[in-house]
Image: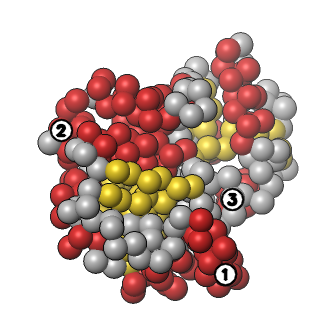
Amino acid sequence: MMSHSRTRRLLALLAALAATLSLAAGCGGREAQTGQEAKQINIGYIAWDEDIAVTYLYKELLERRGYTVNATELEAGPIYAGLAQGNPDLFLDGWLPSTHEDYWKQYGPQLEDLGVWYDQATLNIAVPNYMTDVNSIADLKGKGAELGGTVTGIDPGAGLSRTTKEALPAYGLQGEFTLQTSSTTAMLAALQKATDERKPIVVTLWHPHWAYARYPIKDLQDPLGAMGAAEQIHAIGRKGFSQDFPEVTDMVKKFRLTDQQLASLENEINSAAKGQEQAAAKKWADANPDVIRSFAG
């Protein structure tokens, strides 16, 4: 998910221009040859771990059914603008009601909401499982010295960073803890080092994320709701998608992943070498036949 701040309206207004440039290379303008009869589909995806994971899972499953699948990575704005123009056909990572709110307000009437496949997209403060006396954000009070007074975060401009800065005072932690921002990569490296050495650490994280499958960590309870409510991840099609792709629509509408299933899929793909994402998706699908049967027959 989100190493970026929440989408701003200006970005949404500029998306159409960006789409004109980006989509000219392969995404933008309805392509008559796509559809179930032609067995061809264009999927747009953003560079967020869960979208990469599910896009390559769908690519693998649809190619097994004889489809030609063109998967193209773009920013969110150009994808929404492209969907409104008719290309790509499908986007599997629509964060609503908040993160992609501006895009949905602008383009939603021209799109098809194909349903929610994940409903626990949350922002979190997390610690290792072995910190057994810390189970709520409130439990951090009085532990600043033990933890170096630091909450290890991601980019300073991320929405998660802003939310965490607002949450610390809600729990009376503003004088005891400081959010240390850097990057997602740096945060994950610090988390791995701490858990390898079984040392205490507090980090900012979000669901869905593969770190929950790789490291022994837990989210801290947030009884005050200071980190915000859960969002939903929607599959979104261009106008006419369900009519042109009835078989894929049936798959998408049945598609559901639990937090554990999605984390394990992300972890499988994140652990693969660059360019081997689909091979990793195939490996995960073969190891989870019951999950695949639940939506893909």
**Upstream in sequence: badge 3 or badge 2:** 3
* Residue on which the image places disc 1: 17
Q: Quadrant of residue 265?
A: top left
Q: Quadrant of residue 228?
A: bottom right
| Residue 103, position as x, y percentages in the image | 54, 77
Residue placed most toward the observer, 254 or 193 = 254
Q: CA distance from mark 3 to mark 2?
A: 34 Å
**Upstream in sequence: badge 1 or badge 2:** 1
Marks 3 and 2 in Cβ contact (< 8 Å):
no
Q: Residues within 10 Å of mark 2 (few under 14, many from 20)?
A: few
Left or right relative to 41: residue 134: right
Judged from the image, the secondary structure of the residue bearing numbered disc 1 is helix
Q: CA distance from mark 1 to mark 2?
A: 41 Å
Q: Residues within 10 Å of mark 3 (few under 14, many from 20)?
A: some
Residue placed most toward the observer, 51 or 129 = 51
Which callout, 1 or 2, points to the residue nearer the camera? 1
Asked whether residue 128 is in view, the answer is: yes
Above or below residue 267? Residue 258 is below
Q: Which mark is residue 4?
A: 3
Q: CA distance from mark 1 to mark 3?
A: 20 Å
